[in-house]
Amino acid sequence: MSKPKILITNDDGISAPGLRYLIEVMKELGDLVIIAPDKPQSGMAHAVTIQTPLRIHEIVNTPGYQEYSCSGTPVDCVKLGQKVIMKCNPDLIVSGINHGSNSSINVLYSGTMAAVIEGAMEDIPAIGFSLNDYAYHADFSHCAPYILTISKQVLGNGLPDGVCLNVNFPEKNSSPIKGIKVVRQAKAFWDESFDERKDPHRRSYFWLQGEFVCKDTADDTDQWALKNNYVSLVPVSIDLTAHHAMKEIKKWDFPANTSNQ
Amino acid sequence: MSKPKILITNDDGISAPGLRYLIEVMKELGDLVIIAPDKPQSGMAHAVTIQTPLRIHEIVNTPGYQEYSCSGTPVDCVKLGQKVIMKCNPDLIVSGINHGSNSSINVLYSGTMAAVIEGAMEDIPAIGFSLNDYAYHADFSHCAPYILTISKQVLGNGLPDGVCLNVNFPEKNSSPIKGIKVVRQAKAFWDESFDERKDPHRRSYFWLQGEFVCKDTADDTDQWALKNNYVSLVPVSIDLTAHHAMKEIKKWDFPANTSNQ
């Protein structure tokens, strides 16, 4: 039986320790194609490059292991990996391990998770892995068994139509991880401001800065799981329709001149 | 009573005719703050600028009407508009009118809709408007009454928690619009490829190209509404949890060494 074909990407860039760790872990599961951004692409979300052309740079190409860097975003990497390099759909896409949590609403800003959502849009099973530790030299050593067990489940069972997985690991600490929790995205927000500075020409420029705030203390969320030393696993939908809100909005009164112009 | 404060942005950039049209329409509803990208930002999705600082350029500043361009993405525009320019939450965010449809899965690539989703993340009622016509000089003249009626409903009723609106208009044609349909996001995909070219140094570069394919023919989708000359209105959720998939995934068998390491 041929080995599964696995596409690996991330948003921290081709040299990020989280990606290098993920590659080492995935080697035992299949033939790997790695294509990752040639520079950090954190916060690029689902951006695609359409104003400039894309470049690919081949780094390693040996049987069962191919590695490329790409001038674009994580979503560009998935599209190029699939269409230009593999010329077929991989059996699995894994993205990460991100340096920093992609739990809660961070899923919407995350390039790591956008690559995974792109997989679901293409009917390819896909998993994003992130560590709740922003440090460049973070300790990922507790993640391997969970990456393997979740990846094996997805390779074996597939995923429901239009669904991908957002997996977050608690930062390494002295207590062992308690297990995996299948949970929902916590309600939270970023309390943000801009740091205004003056350039040498006395013109203003702005840096975004902020703090993540979660007031959702329920015990069925990704934030709760991480806080309690569990691996959080959120199934993520590519259907953004707020089905629960349809009934209420259908009641709205649209004047005749617009509802039947 | 003071007029509502309305923040307007887009992803096609400050000079796009779709934005200029939207500004003219919204003038009768409130005091306007316009902050839009200084260059096209289509396909930038929910990207935020964190690797470089941001610049704002003031264009017009008269009572009830302020206009700025910004070096960043649509989501940057919302954050800067709210935190730096208005120093408070607007009563409403409107984004668009996008040159091109943001129906179906395009909501995930769209900078126009990302600005709106950012509003929902900040508890600000927000609506994205898009026209199913990519032409720069597209005819927007049939959109005004629908923009006004939907905006008035949202100003009056608010929106459910964590929900924003994705409104798409059919392209202008000889038949009058039949009305507004509250619908779900159609299942569809982009059938894509890369156009590989050689630069003068004989090195490859790639342009993304593709065709939108929708095989979802049900009559409760945004694609159906547009095709049948209705305005489509999809309530969009910032909670991406695939709640329908949780039960199935909770059944997965995680070996003891990982579920209770």
Image (tube, coloured by chain):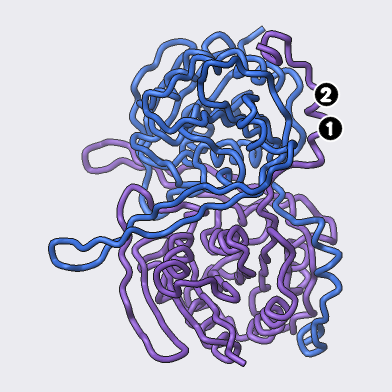
Chain colours: A purple, B blue
Q: Residue B209 location in percent, x, y?
A: 40, 52
What's the mark number on residue B80? none
Circle number at residue A247: 1
Which quadrant does the N terminus of chain B fall into?
top right
User: Residue shown at 45%/46% (left/top)?
Assistant: B43
On the image, numbered disc 2 is attached to which residue? A251
- In the rendered view, does A12 fall on the left or right side of A53? right
Q: Is residue A190 above or below residue B250?
A: above
Depth check: A249 or B255 in front? A249
At mark 2, the secondary structure is loop
Residue B38, given in percent of the width and then of the height, sits at 34, 34
Looking at the rendered structure, whether the residues under marks 1 and 2 are on a common chain is answered as yes
Give, as a three-letter code, the residue at label 2. Answer: Lys
C-alpha separation, residue under disc 1 versus residue under disc 2: 7 Å
In the rendered view of the protein, which quadrant contains the C terminus of chain B? bottom right
Rendered residue at 51%/59% (across/down): A111
Q: Position of residue B196 (x, y in %)?
A: 30, 62
Residue B237 visible in the shown view: no
Residue drawn 41% across and 12% down?
A: B62
Q: Secondary structure at mark 1?
A: helix
Residue count near mark 1 (Cα–Cα under 10 Å), binned few <14, some 14–19, many ≥20? few
Q: Nearer the viewer, residue B162 or A155?
A: A155
Question: What chain is tagged by disc 2?
Answer: A
- Give the x, y percent position of residue A84: 40, 69
Q: Does residue A198 show up?
A: yes
Instruction: Tell me if residue B26 comes above or below residue B79 in the rendering.
Output: above
Is A103 on the left-hand or right-hand side of B251?
A: left
Q: Quadrant of residue B4?
A: top right
CB-based contact (under 8 Å), mark 1 and mark 2: yes
- Amino acid type shown at disc 1: Lys
Tell me the chain of label 1: A
**Res. A181 image quadrant:** bottom right
